[in-house]
Image (spheres, rainbow, N blue to C red):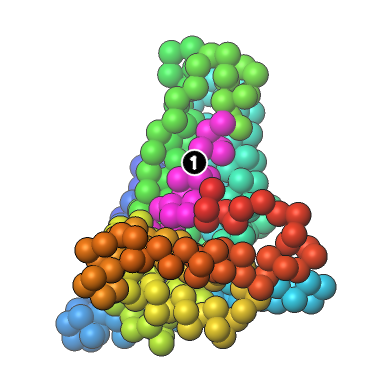
Amino acid sequence: MADTPLNDAPKLNDSKSASFSTRLRLRLGKLGAIIASVGAVVGGLAGYWHAWDILHSHVGRDTTTTAASTGLIVSKGPSVAVLPVSSPIAAPGLVSFADRVTQQLASSLGRFSTLRVIPRATAANFLKEGDDAIKAARKAQVDYLVSGEVHPLGGGARANIHVSDLRTGTEIWSKSFDANAEGVQTETSAYEIGDAAAVQIGGYPGAIMNADYSQSQNKPVFELSPYECIVHAVVGSVRGLSSAILKALECSKRLTERQPNNAFAWSARATVLFNQRSMGIGLPSDQIQHTDKRLYLNEEILRARHGPWSLHPTMRSLKEPTLWR
């Protein structure tokens, strides 16, 4: 994969108080400008996407894997790396607190099985490259980079967490979380912040899934990867647009027929069918006008919700699919 030169990035403040997160955001801004300018030179919108393909040949890849021992299929999506949350200002307990936030954030993101979370040790090594941390992450084929910093706030602390898309060079999500003095001292707030941030970043849908939806929104159904189809089923249903739901219905039907042991594909299809039943999208006019005439979809929803994968011994003990919680 070709790497965009970063040595011409603007000089950053060398002050020790400058956090890596701040420098990362500045460099990502430069990276985004580089990608856009290359596209413009090649020629308009088409040139932009051509340049995109050259610079990021790994975009849109889907590593659908089969567990040999179970026969279940898991559609893997983008890779995510969590950089160590920094504590630029020396304050009692903040360094340990920041480390706990990092630990919990990475651990909680790993629970979302569609994400490929880079091991913490590998992510920490990116920082050893200094100003080339972004380049190191991109060489490791990282799609999304999570960074953050913790600052003192009264007797407590404020953790600022950011998510950057290394494929576009843009920040897609940022939020601050506050902790009181007791939460910092006992580090209980660190675990709460890590969990809360992980859900908002990697949830169904979260910041990453929404970003991936935007990336593949204009793709025709037959070009969507299994992961992208699941994204369309989840995000499209939430947004409630007729065109989005119809597209999700088509791709989820294709996916479940092609991969009948894909648990997330069935859960995603059940989600779309539920919204179709609720709103009457894509149904005959008489069914749109009369709710009772589309209750027959309940059977299909249940069939999708408890698809063939649910009959596998490994899955029988599981509760509702994550998408339905």
**Number of numbered markers:** 1
Query: How would you rate the neighbour count of disc 1 (Cα within 10 Å): few for under 14, some for 14-19, many for 20 or more?
Result: many
The residue to which callout 1 is attached is 197
Residue plotted at (51% across, 38% down): 196
Question: Relative to residue 75, is residue 13 depicted above or below?
Answer: above
In the image, farthest residue toward the right: 69
Vertically, is 20 above or below 27?
A: above
Residue 85 is situated, as x and y percent measured from the top left of the image, at: 54, 39
User: In the image, is residue 203 part of the stretch drawn in magenta?
Assistant: yes
Q: Which residues are magenta?
A: 192-212
Tell me what residue is drawn at x 23 percent, y 70 percent.
Answer: 286
Asked if residue 323 is positioned above or below residue 51 in the image, the reply reads above
Please give left or right for residue 139 compared with residue 236 in the image: right
Q: Nearer the viewer, residue 319 or 175?
A: 319
Residue at image coords 66%, 73%: 308
Check if residue 191 falls in the magenta segment: no
**Which residue is located at x 62 percent, y 79 percent?**
260
- Percent of width and height locating residue 162: 42, 45
Q: Nearer the viewer, residue 28 or 132?
A: 28
Q: Which kind of residue does numbered mark 1 sit on?
A: Ala
Q: Main secondary structure of the magenta part?
A: helix
Please tell me which residue lies in front, 142 or 294: 294
